[in-house]
Image: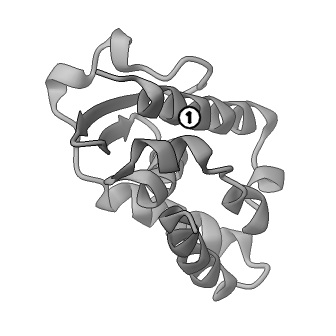
Amino acid sequence: MNPIKKIEEEIIDEFSVFGDDWEAKYNYIIELGKELAPISEQYKKDEYLIKGCQSRVWLKAERKNGIVEFMADSDALIPKGIIALLLKLVNHQKAEDIQQYDFDVINKIGLQQHLSPTRANGLVSMINTIKALASNKT
């Protein structure tokens, strides 16, 4: 089993505590963003911006011995929380596990349907960029 699936189960459990209270879920997502380690200013450049996000979201990946380490930041609370949530799943995981992972957790916790169309597009862009960076051999 892909080790990311275990983290997915933990995230689903965390979100289930809030029931149908999306205000509480959004607050939790914002808290995740606040806990995200700040990205170095040297990576707050256009080359690290995720294309397709309405807000500015920067993502940097480094590969060490097949393990991908991500750093991210955003200028907006919800997108920063969303990228933090995604990184909670994939940070420090094997590149091939990230590439094979389906990110279905987004549907399982109901996030996709509770985002505006522009945020939902940004979420898809975040996932696509994570997968692309994980597939990069550099």
Residue in the foreground of this view, choosing between 134 and 72: 134
Would you call the spot at circle 1 few (<14 residues within 10 Å), some (14-19), or many (20 or more)?
A: many
Question: Which quarter of the rendered picture does the C terminus lie within?
Answer: top left
Residue under the image location 17 percent in, 26 percent down? 41
Describe the element under mark 1 as helix, strand or loop. helix
Residue in the foreground of this view, choosing between 21 and 102: 102
Q: Amino acid at mark 1?
A: Met
Residue in the foreground of this view, choosing between 64 and 70: 64
- Above or below, 104 against 72 in this view is below
Residue under the image location 51 percent in, 26 percent down? 132
Q: Is residue 87 left or right of residue 25?
A: left
List x then y, in percent, for residue 89.
48, 59
Q: Quadrant of residue 69?
A: top left
Question: Which quarter of the rendered picture does the N terminus lie within?
Answer: bottom right
- Above or below, 82 against 109 in this view is above
Residue under the image location 22 percent in, 44 percent down? 38
Q: Of all residues shown, which one is farthest toward the top?
A: 46
Q: Is residue 105 left or right of residue 51?
A: right
List x then y, in percent, for residue 110.
78, 63
Q: Is residue 109 left or right of residue 72?
A: right
List x then y, in percent, for residue 23.
67, 70
List x then y, in percent, for residue 63.
26, 35
- Above or below, 113 against 127 in this view is below
What residue is shown with label 1? 126
- Above or below, 107 against 7 in this view is above
Q: How many dots with numbers?
A: 1
Residue under the image location 78 percent in, 59 percent down? 107
